[in-house]
Amino acid sequence: MEFFDIAETWDRKKIEETQLTRLRTTVERCMNAPFYAERLNKAGINASSLKSLDDLKRIPFTTKGDLRSQYPYGLVTVPHAELVRLHASSGTTGSPVAVHYTQEDLNAWADLMARCLHCAGIRKTDVFQNIAGYGLFTGGLGIHAGAERLGCLTIPSGTGNTARQIKFLQDFNVTAVHIIPSYAMYLAGKVEEAGLEPRELPVRKAVIGAEPHTEEIRKKIEYMLGVDAYNSYGLSEMNGPGVAFECTHKNGMHVWEDAYIVEIIDPDTLEHVPDGEVGELVLTTLTRRGMPILRYRTRDLTRIIPEPCPCGRVHCRIDRMMGRSDDMFIIKGCNVYPMQIEQVLMSYPEVEKNYLITLETVNDVDEIRVQVEINDQIFVEDMRALTALQKNMARQLSNEILVTPKIDLVQRNSLPVSEGKAVRVVDKRKKFKTN
Ligand code: AMP
Ligand code: ZN
């Protein structure tokens, strides 16, 4: 079989030896960040005290809260002059999470990304259209660099302007795309509306990721567009895309264990769960220089697939993401916590305490609807006042979560009240339905 990187051929022994060496280097580097130095010293850990990979368990976890507390530069471990890029993740009120890269980090990331695309059967002869946001979101520049590194003619078409996307797919004879699943469904619909048969487009391979989706949705995308679709997983904190990717067998995503250490924990007890059982994915970077991260709690729920992959690579496979151990949801590529919405709503004196967030698919587009109870006094105001309030709320929320919601102002006590824990988010999106 053809491999992009020699590391893909490593056996378990070679992987684990490399991991231990790189973990020691990573711990050593982390000592340059006062946050980590203090934590590691407190736990009595230094590079030479790590005798085996089992010692990883002695290292404290890192959480999103830690990363936010160290914003903007707290976790940088190299002189600032060595930094050449930063990305930031959406989905946080106040300080976001900033991730810093040196040139070596960017090179290593591009190599990993190229390895992913190659492992899904994409080759330098492919024309690759990257239908993803270029900007702070890592799916744009990250996947782009990988496709170029592989040698594909790479089209940075970004998001939106669906008519132009379709034109490019046709005109440049595009054979591979990167696209988020919900947009893939929408695009297929638009191709049909334009009087074309989506399956007749030249595209043969689609990389889909950045948001949770079911196996049924993958099959639907494959059928509608006449492509093979491969699941791609990543998160800004770990570079972005390129952390885990499906090979041509499409049965779980290989995590590149020469670059990341994988653990699956029970989110309540924080203990490891046996291979095959679902838990929270915890990742440690092994090659990052600018901003290494130890035992990062991703909050994504998955499991290790214990059976060997028929492709022969022994880098472990994880199953598609099965949910989150927190309440974050992803809509139109933006990570959103219900608490961000609540904070904005509660800043309005007109708002009562109850609200409901509904995620739905309208004409193949995912939308977010927020129903808000407002007080009686306002409710009897004239239509103009209500419309102004509605618009203002939509704008404030859009500033906060980067997606513009539809706002319904409703009368006090008109929304359902749940006994026990309030249900704040109802997800009716098509991509989570199986038929
Ligand atoms: P961001 O850092 O903004 O790119 O968001 C990363 C988050 O997106 C991850 O922690 C996951 O929750 C989600 N995500 C990324 N890729 C996938 C995927 N293939 N399947 C499910 N969720 C994903
Ligand atoms: Zn495989």
Image (spheres, rainbow, N blue to C red):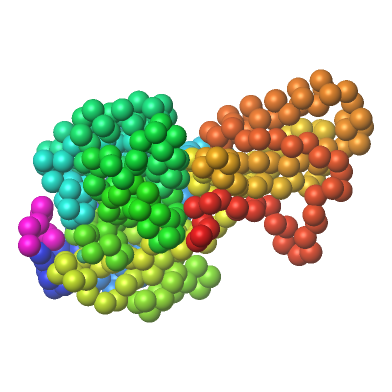
Instruction: Name the one closer to the observer, 205 or 194.
Output: 194
- Residue 243 position, x and y percent, is 29, 53
- Residue 280 position, x and y percent, is 44, 65
- Residue 36 position, x and y percent, is 37, 52
Above or below for 319 versus 125: below
Residue 42: tell me if it is visible: no
Identify the residue at horizontal 37%, vertical 49% (top origin). 224
Q: Residue furthest front?
A: 195
Instruction: Name the one closer to the observer, 168 or 207.
Output: 168
Span shown in magenta: 1-8
Above or below for 129 versus 272: above
- Residue 405 position, x and y percent, is 62, 35
Instruction: Name the one closer to the observer, 364 or 64.
Output: 364
Determine the image quadrant of residue 48.
Answer: bottom left
Identify the residue at horizontal 31%, vertical 45% (top origin). 199
Determine the image quadrant of residue 55.
Answer: bottom left
**Magenta span: chief secondary structure:** loop
Identify the residue at horizontal 87%, vertical 43% (top origin). 412
Q: Residue furthest top?
A: 384
Above or below for 106 versus 390: below
Horizontal relation, residue 267 to residue 369: left or right: left
Determine the image quadrant of residue 216.
Answer: bottom left
Instruction: Name the one closer to the observer, 434 or 263.
Output: 434
